[in-house]
């Protein structure tokens, strides 16, 4: 049985700080805005907050390009604000984790500035710098960037190519250099000493690149849309570097080994964002006895085979079901999975499933029930709890994301209709601000928001959802309360009924108290379609049709 560590029973909530709440009316959300709204998060029943980056950054990729890991972006606030936020969370019994973006740094980070000035010196070894002969000649290999074009940038001044898997201002760090690994461990220790409870690690499975940086296979490149990935998705030293980081970074030096509680767990939680690794590698990365990470995000859940988020298609909830069924069946008895359907990099799930507004609440609840009552650790992305949907961006000018902007430009050059792709898949759908109430700018800011609101339904602000007992928000609160009361819904086992049926999802959760022998057993069923469906006769409870996307929860005695 898995040990009942806190993060296995926790509900996480991802805050996208620049779009959560703006306290100083400059149009951008900030740390104080989060402090002011902590009660919303606490009332939801959340156990741990995860903040997307708040660090100093030229903001080329909304803070995922960091120029100083120990400073806060002035627009977001100060270190004192962060200390206050940490206290505010802990006072409410919640934990707080931050986003560690160390596959790459900003080109404005002092390490990179030094590297440019003296490419043959110490900091030149922090990055992947390569000469051209004669300069610039061709890029050192054929790898492509996730944000369009080649993964190499020519540095005029240094006369070197520099590797960037993301935007050209996000330069990949050379983790084969032990000094880089020590720097990262120090950053982690520095933040743990301030009292945070761990980190989500950005694209952490990309850190180990194959020696010599060989060309990517063209066939794999076409299949994945990006060239070179086979040389770093699961690189040669990945496991070794992660175990080392756990020992040197995530193990607290200031607390006894068996200490537990917000801000003082002996080992801080380590959650990997790991695109493209599959179930088996995911198991290796999180197996308890290997001492690497605690949880990872497996992105297979987000699209069925053959689809990417750039396709304009309806996401079948049967895929969410088959993903969970398949994943659970392949997990070992002590393995633990994370449960997520949204984040700041993906369109809103309700819109992908069912853009017809009459089903918005029903779909929102169906997704909530599947996510919160399955076996694993749920991560709610801000806005999910108020049934946020995609935006109707009027044109390309309304988009802000570097990925969308680059992709549009690239599509134009290649003669594709980029607008359709980008409107389907843009990360900006999930990045428009929280809607708190019906005052101007939905209570997000008294200024001009950094990104506009392009969807105007009524009934889907926090204030309206709070007032409506049948709302998605109150459904989330109710489910989380149930999880807290009944161990069956967190640590309990899971058993699926009719695992292959695509239109209906039914599963048992069961927990036997090791001390009293008392058994608690639940049956949850969800209609995965907009049609009425009849549950199988093997399902417990009265046999009656389920309405579109209906959720039914039964506690058995
Ligand atoms: O970009 C991708 C393919 O379209 C993804 O697979 C990508 O690798 C993944 O979403 C990485 O995301 C993370 O790192 C990025 C940042 O822009 C994202 O916001 C972050 O979540 C670079 O730091």
Image (cartoon, rainbow, N blue to C red):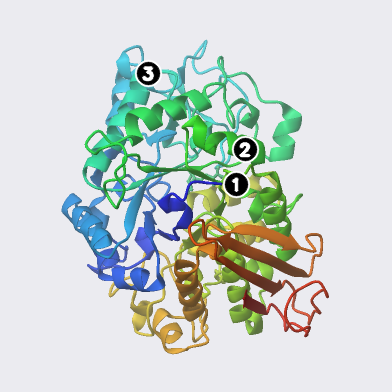
Near-viewer residue (450 or 326): 326
- Residue holding disc 3: 178
Q: Which structural element holds mark 3?
A: helix
Instruction: Using the image as rendered, state which of residue 164 and residue 537 is in the foreground.
Output: 537
Q: Nearer the viewer, residue 218 or 33?
A: 33
Secondary element type, mark 1: loop
Residue matched to label 2:
277
Q: Estimate the x, y position of residue 480 in percent, counting from the top left.
A: 47, 70
Under tag 2, what secondary structure? loop
Residue in the picture at 54% in, 23% down: 209
Q: Residues within 10 Å of mark 3 (few under 14, many from 20)?
A: few
Report the side of 225 relative to 115 (left or right): right
Q: Residue at x 52, y 76 (%)?
A: 455
The image position of residue 36, as x and y in percent, is: 25, 70
Which residue is labeled 1 in the image?
298
- Rounded to the nearest angstrom, the CA distance separating label 3 from label 1 is 28 Å
Q: Are marks 2 and 1 in contact (CB under 8 Å)?
A: yes
Residue ID at (30%, 20%): 117
Precedes in sequence: disc 2 or disc 3: 3
Which is more N-terminal, label 1 or label 3? 3
């Amino acid at each position: 049985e898995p040990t009942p560590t806190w993060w296995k029973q926790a509900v996480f909530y991802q805050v996208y700080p620049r779009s959560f709440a703006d306290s100083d009316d400059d149009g951008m959300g900030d740390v104080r805005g989060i402090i002011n709204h902590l009660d919303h998060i606490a009332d939801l029943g959340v156990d741990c907050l995860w903040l997307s980056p708040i660090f100093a950054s030229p903001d080329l990729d909304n803070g995922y390009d960091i120029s100083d890991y120990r400073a806060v972006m002035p627009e977001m606030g100060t270190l004192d604000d962060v200390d206050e936020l940490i206290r505010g969370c802990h006072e409410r019994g919640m934990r707080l984790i931050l986003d560690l973006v160390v596959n790459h740094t900003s080109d404005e980070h002092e390490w990179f500035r030094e590297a440019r000035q003296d490419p043959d010196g110490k900091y030149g070894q922090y990055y992947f710098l390569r000469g051209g002969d004669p300069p610039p000649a061709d890029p050192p290999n054929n790898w492509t960037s996730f944000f369009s074009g080649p993964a190499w940038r020519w540095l005029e001044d240094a006369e070197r190519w520099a590797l960037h898997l993301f935007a050209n201002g996000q330069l990949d760090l050379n983790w084969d250099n032990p000094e880089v690994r020590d720097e990262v461990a120090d950053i982690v220790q520095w933040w743990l000493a301030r009292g945070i409870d761990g980190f989500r690690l950005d694209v952490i499975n990309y850190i180990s690149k194959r020696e010599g940086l060989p060309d990517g296979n063209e066939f794999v490149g076409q299949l994945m849309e990006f060239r070179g990935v086979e040389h770093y998705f699961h690189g040669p030293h990945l496991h070794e570097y992660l175990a080392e980081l756990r020992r040197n970074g995530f193990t607290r030096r200031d607390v006894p080994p068996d200490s537990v509680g917000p801000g003082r767990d002996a080992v801080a939680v380590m959650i990997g964002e790991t695109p493209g690794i599959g179930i088996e590698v995911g198991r290796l990365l999180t197996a308890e006895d290997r001492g690497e990470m605690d949880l990872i995000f497996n992105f297979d859940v987000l699209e069925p085979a053959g689809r990417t988020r750039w396709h304009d298609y309806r996401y079948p909830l049967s895929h969410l079901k088959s993903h969970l069924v398949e994943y659970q069946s392949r997990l070992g008895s002590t393995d633990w999975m994370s449960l997520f359907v949204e984040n700041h990099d993906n369109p809103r799930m309700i819109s992908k499933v069912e853009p017809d507004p009459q089903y918005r609440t029903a779909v929102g609840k169906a997704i909530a029930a599947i996510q919160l009552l399955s076996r694993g650790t749920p991560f709610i992305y801000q806005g999910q709890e108020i049934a946020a949907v995609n935006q109707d961006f009027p044109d390309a000018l309304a988009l802000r994301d570097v990925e969308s902007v680059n992709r549009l430009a690239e599509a134009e050059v290649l003669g594709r209709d980029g607008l359709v792709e980008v409107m389907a898949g843009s990360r900006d759908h999930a990045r428009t601000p929280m809607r708190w109430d019906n005052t101007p700018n939905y209570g997000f800011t008294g200024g001009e928001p950094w990104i506009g609101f392009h969807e105007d339904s009524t009934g889907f602000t926090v204030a309206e959802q709070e007032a409506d007992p049948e709302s998605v928000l109150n459904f989330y609160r109710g489910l989380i309360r149930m999880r807290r009361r009944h161990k069956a819904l967190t640590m309990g086992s899971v058993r699926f009924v009719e695992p292959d049926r695509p239109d209906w999802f039914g599963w048992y959760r069961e927990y036997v108290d090791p001390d009293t022998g008392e058994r608690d057993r639940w049956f949850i069923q969800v209609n995965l379609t907009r049609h009425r469906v009849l549950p199988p006769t093997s399902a417990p409870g009265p046999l009656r049709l389920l309405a579109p996307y209906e959720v039914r929860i039964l506690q058995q005695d």
